[in-house]
Amino acid sequence: MDFSFAKTAFSNTQDFLSREWLETNHLGGYASSSLLNCHTRKYHGLLVAEIEAFAEKFVLLSKCEDYVIINDISYPLCGSQFPNYFQEGSFHCFQRFDLTTHPCWTFQFNDITITKEILMPHLRNTVLIRYKTSSKQPITLQLRPMIAARNFHELTHENDCMSRILSSSKQGYQIKPYATFPNLYFQINTAFECEQNPVWYKQYEYREEQERGYPYREDLFSPGQFTIACYQHQDIIFSASSNELSDDLSLIFQNEIKRRVKLRRSYTGTPLEQQLKQSGQDFLKYFTRVQKDEIRDEKGRATGAYLSIDENTDSSLRQSITLVAGYPWFLDWGRDAMISLPDLTLSTDQAAECLAILKSFAEQEHQGIIPNFLGKTPEENAYNSADASLWFAWAVQQYYLTTKDRSSIKKRLWPTLKSIFSHYQAGTLYQIHQRENGLLYAGDPGTNVTWMDAIVNGKPATPRYGAIVELNALWYNFICFMQELATCFGEKITAKNFATLAQKIQNAFQQVFWIKSSNHLKDYVNDDGEDLSIRPNQIIAASLPYSPLAKDMAIGVIEIVIKHLLTPYGLRTLSPEDPHYIGIYQGEQSKRDQAYHNGTVWPWLLGHFARAVNKVYADRATTQQLLQPCVDALTRHLSEAGIGCVSEIFDGDAPHHPRGCIHQAWSVAAFLQLAQSLYKH
């Protein structure tokens, strides 16, 4: 799918400000802004890159203030918001925005046409901006890079520590903003003049941050200005990079486009499915992980010393792959990765990448827990979830169902799966343990161990501990899958024991969670009581390959979800009839966190709703009636927030305004699952 917006498509500039574009480099870095190239978020920037030394993302180059000068009149090609003043960026000359392989803007100044394209090359912390001019008269292009050089969660202000020196390099100019930062290199593919004119530009405003209750004004530093004389038809490429580029900029640009076109042509399915497969590739992240291998003595005993694997180590040992949870502000999250992984990789014939990510997380397992967050080193991983390990097992199961690759699972993943089982059964971190009835219990009143993990004033906004419904559905599915694998691997006694335990869990699950009077599942049960509220977690029990529910129970769950939770964009996290329901996700952080899992709509749950519907209903008419409205709404959404993207969340109340991150991995995965299940069915 291609996306095109003519200026006439919208009534005013606000429609362009509310839509955003995104480029990623598969290193965790990105470039992003509004369609007017007027930043509305602190996360917007032309070169946002992960700096390994900090294991964080930094906005290196925020903007490039670009002007075209025609007959001594200067026309800005990007917008900016200042206090009481909005620079709309030659909107009167703007013609259209197009997104095919990459974003492109077209401007018309009488008989002069100028296009501006932005591209991030694969596996480079680099952004390329290409200007194509078509003019019968000489024109001038002026580029002023605006440096932020700060953590992408923060803002910067004028200071004396920022380097003011632009020094020449082999291919252009460079600056080292701060002593601990990498150099920032600027290059242009044609002759240009550099005017060193260091200036702080004050009080850029970001309206989204203001609405979210955060500081929203920033100063940006410009070390100077580049001027290029343009003649008739010319392609000018400006690059900003954390490394000096030795290759021809035009060649880098063209090769990246060829790579993307080839990739797009490899995708099968409808145009919508192809678009979602393409969007899903944004989340793949290749990186060099700093590992620490414990040194042992000649008898294999731990010495307490560690051998660091660094840049001098063989690349096959250093290269890792993971999934970014969402853009712009999420990093590498275990739970999100496991839920997203099967749909984003197996549907695109990337079984090798799927296995590599599973192995990468398996290697970080600790006391049966798959990390919920990957730190710079294993010591910095966060092992604070009860469900990441069970979603890991589900992802392995999806890999197995697609590939039947028993050999890799037995060699690389079976030991981790057994470790998860033994630790969960015996008891591990965060009070995770199996009770006599076979059910899994986890957490306490002061902790969040599931995906509903918002904290408000130091306390869980959605307390869930004890026997939690989706944890136990996943636990049952996990035990059944372990029985299946043990049988395949010839471990007959182990398989028999798993079969006995699975039956025990299923009996207890139905007895403990099922509410016969209303035909739905409790959300959790603990020693202090039970939660009878209608939440979407129960749909997972009906969607899994091995469901603990009888068919009539699964139908009951689907019907209650349709009645109370289903919207065109996903499932609400709480029934609107509940007194704790919050239908609008807005305001400062504590208000938003309170709403996060108490009514807010999450698209990722649609993937499991679709699985449950296709599993329970055999006729196409029913599945199409339930799923088609969601496909239609989300297809429209691809043009309404992040272009070609699927948002993290939506308001629970109509018209279900998109909120949160503009591009969320498990949202894309769910939409792809939804589309594929509908069209396949």
Image: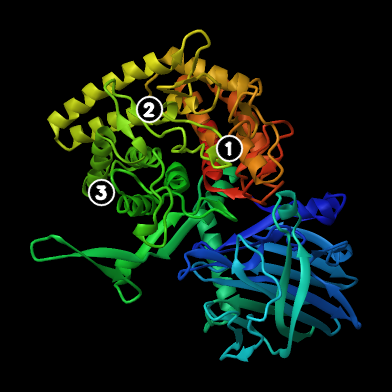
Q: Is residue 478 left or right of residue 40?
A: left
**Which numbered tag is attached to residue 518?**
none
**Mark 2, secondary structure of its residue:** helix
**Disc 1 marks which residue?**
603
Image marks 2 and 3: residues in contact by CB distance under 8 Å: no
Name which of mark 2 and mark 3 comes first in the sequence. 3
Front-most of residues 658 and 364 = 364
**Mark 1, secondary structure of its residue:** loop
Looking at the picture, does residue 218 appear above or below residue 382?
below
Tell me where residue 500 appears, x and y as whole percent. Answer: 22, 22
Q: Quadrant of residue 160?
A: bottom right
Front-most of residues 429 and 648 = 429
Label 1 crowd bin: few (<14), some (14–19), many (20+), radius 10 Å? many
Name which of mark 2 and mark 1 comes first in the sequence. 2
**Disc 3 marks which residue?**
408
Image marks 2 and 1: residues in contact by CB distance under 8 Å: no
Looking at the picture, does residue 548 appear above or below residue 277?
above
Q: What amino acid type should be assigned to the residue bearing mark 2? A: Asn
Q: Which residue is at a point 60% across and 63% down the rendered structure image?
A: 152
> Looking at this rendering, what residue extends furthest in the left direction?
299
**Disc 2 marks which residue?**
472
Q: Quadrant of residue 496?
A: top left
Name which of mark 3 and mark 1 comes first in the sequence. 3
In space, the residues marked 3 and 1 are separated at their CA atoms by 32 Å
Q: Can the viewer see residue 467 in this picture?
A: yes
Q: Is residue 496 left or right of residue 536?
A: left
Q: Which residue is at a point 73% across and 53% down the rendered structure image?
A: 208
Tell me where residue 432 appears, x and y as whole percent. Answer: 34, 35
Q: Is residue 434 left or right of residue 125?
A: left
